[in-house]
Amino acid sequence: MLIEPNEPRKLIALHGVSHGIELKLMDEVLSFGSVVKGSRLSKILQLSNFGDVKAHFKWDSSKYLDHFTIEPESGFVAPNSNLDLEVTFHPKKADLDVHLKKIPCIIKGGDKLELTLMGKSANLDTTSSEEVSFNTKVRQATSQNVTI
């Protein structure tokens, strides 16, 4: 094969691919409303990996541990999949404004995510409780009205 002067020739072809991490929280704010002190309420938060590689994450629990838990606190999300996180509000004292802003979730090799958690904690209202007693003879029906 004879090549003429200044005749263009393809000498090499390069192809490449880029792999990246792209994690997103489906909700950036979780509001729990009012919860009685000493009880708990859980909600599911979805963490999605839109990237091409497995992504490792870890929540900074020091920012929320007094009022909330997030399970799992650390782990990984497979590529193109979702992970359900259980976020639980468990107030230990009455507080009408529990508001934790920008709780960081560290992503290994990626940008951190931030979550805001809100809730209210109230004492149990015992002023309107009433004990109802039922007395009857064996094999004899009885009924009472109960106001709820």
Image (cartoon, rainbow, N blue to C red):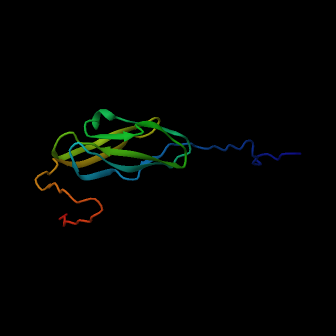
User: In terms of depth relative to the viewer, which is nearer, 29 or 148?
Assistant: 148
Residue furthest top in the image:
62
Where is residue 6? Give x, y as percent. Answer: 76, 47
Quadrant containing the N terminus is top right
Q: Is residue 22 among the parts visible in the rendering?
A: yes
Q: Is residue 57 among the parts visible in the rendering?
A: no
At 73% across and 42% down in the image, what residue appears?
12
Residue furthest right in the image:
1
User: In terms of depth relative to the viewer, which is nearer, 124 or 2?
Assistant: 124
Answer left or right for 93 relative to 17: left
User: In terms of depth relative to the viewer, which is nearer, 49 or 45?
Assistant: 45
At 55% across and 45% down in the image, what residue appears?
79
Where is residue 52? Give x, y as percent. Answer: 56, 45
Residue furthest front in the image:
138
User: In terms of depth relative to the viewer, which is nearer, 10 or 59?
Assistant: 59
Where is residue 95? Give x, y as percent. Answer: 16, 44
Where is residue 90? Give x, y as percent. Answer: 27, 42
Q: How many numbered callouts?
A: 0
At 35% across and 50% down in the image, what residue appears?
43
Q: Which quadrant of the structure image shows residue 144? A: bottom left
Quadrant containing the C terminus is bottom left
At 28% across and 52% down in the image, what residue appears?
31
